[in-house]
Image: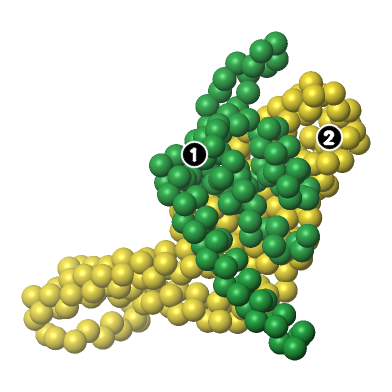
């Protein structure tokens, strides 16, 4: 997938995942890297930024048989941000699809 | 690359950050390695998937300095942010250097004008109060004959100087924040240029 596409949607993917359930870092990285091909290390700077911007908060929870883990969840502002990005994404994709549709008709006339 | 080498290389890139922030960052990656090993992957495989620790460190460093400059509006924080971003190989910043220097100079000039007014006012006040302080052979030219008018002038100078000095702080803060945002924008351009390294 085109690199510029990936960057734009990474925030949205992480926020959307966390809007469904709280996750720990490794989980987030695995879920995201299944969909978007990225260097896994880059998820952590993104999580730090979203946390500093107040969209995420973290808490520590014991894991079964392992060390305690840091979980991430959405704040109220994060939830609003996720909704806004989601709407922007769908309206953007819709517009591009319409445009590409027009292009296709022109090409195949 | 094993976990220890990955973390060491990452840490060595972050040495200009506060200790607690470095520990937080390192702890995140340590937890990642632990969870990966638990899931049955080797340290080498986990490190490879994480990407180049040097690139990662540079990105984290620049992002942290930019965030700091934006939050505090401090000029030294802005310089550190600019330097950290330059470490990523930026040209945009150099092109923008001329206007940045001009605006910074204007703000600095306004600030110095205020300081000079205050200084002049203080000197005028002292000279009026203690005329004997003037060294022999030196002439001090002051408008107005009466001491009262001179003191009023001096106080006026100090007051307007303070006003100008304090007033220059606001555009300076605004300027630093705007610059921090600009540097941050460049950083996102670099992220794209770096492709997978974000």
Name the residue that disc number 1 marks.
A74
Where is residue B84, by image quadrant?
Answer: bottom right
Kindly identify the residue that appears in the image at 70 percent across and 52 percent down: B59
Q: Chain of mark 1?
A: A
Location of residue A51 with respect to B71 vertically, above or below: above
1 vs 2, front mark: 1
Q: What percent of the width, then of the height, locates residue B75? A: 51, 61
Nearer-the-camera pick, B131 or B48:
B48
Side (left or right) of A48 relative to B30: left
Q: Which residue is mark 2?
A: B46
The image quadrant that residue B78 belongs to is bottom right
**Please, what secondary structure does the residue beneath circle 1 have?**
strand
Q: Is residue A49 above or below residue B32?
A: below
**Shown colour of chain A:** green
Total numbered badges shown on the rendered structure? 2
> From where the camera sits, is residue B147 visible?
no
């Amino acid at each position: 997938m085109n690199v510029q596409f990936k960057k734009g949607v990474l925030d949205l993917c992480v926020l959307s995942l966390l809007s469904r359930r709280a996750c720990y870092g490794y989980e987030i990285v695995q879920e995201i890297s299944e969909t978007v091909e990225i260097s896994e290390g880059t998820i952590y700077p993104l999580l730090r930024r979203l946390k500093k911007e107040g969209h995420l908060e973290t808490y520590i929870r014991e894991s079964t048989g392992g060390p305690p883990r840091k979980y991430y969840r959405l704040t109220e502002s994060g939830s609003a941000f996720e909704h806004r990005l989601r709407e922007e994404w769908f309206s953007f994709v819709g517009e591009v699809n319409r445009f590409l549709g027009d292009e296709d008709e022109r090409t195949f006339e | 690359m094993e976990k220890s080498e990955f973390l060491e290389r990452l840490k060595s890139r972050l040495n200009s950050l506060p200790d607690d922030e470095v520990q937080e960052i390192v702890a995140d990656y340590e937890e990642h390695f632990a969870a990966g090993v638990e899931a049955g992957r080797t340290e080498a495989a986990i490190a490879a998937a994480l990407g180049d620790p040097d690139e990662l460190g540079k990105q984290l460093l620049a992002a942290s300095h930019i965030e700091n400059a934006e939050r505090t509006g401090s000029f030294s924080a802005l310089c550190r942010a600019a330097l950290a971003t330059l470490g990523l190989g930026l040209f945009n910043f150099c092109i923008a250097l001329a206007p940045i220097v001009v605006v910074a100079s204007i703000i600095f000039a306004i600030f110095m004008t205020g300081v000079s007014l205050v200084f002049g006012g203080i000197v005028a006040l002292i000279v009026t109060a203690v005329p004997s302080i003037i060294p022999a052979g030196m002439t001090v030219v002051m408008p107005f004959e009466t001491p009262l008018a001179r003191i009023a002038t001096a106080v006026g100078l100090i007051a307007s100087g303070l006003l100008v000095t304090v007033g220059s702080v606001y555009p300076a803060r605004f300027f630093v924040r705007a610059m921090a945002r600009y540097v941050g924008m460049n950083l996102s351009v670099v992220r794209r240029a770096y492709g997978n390294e974000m």
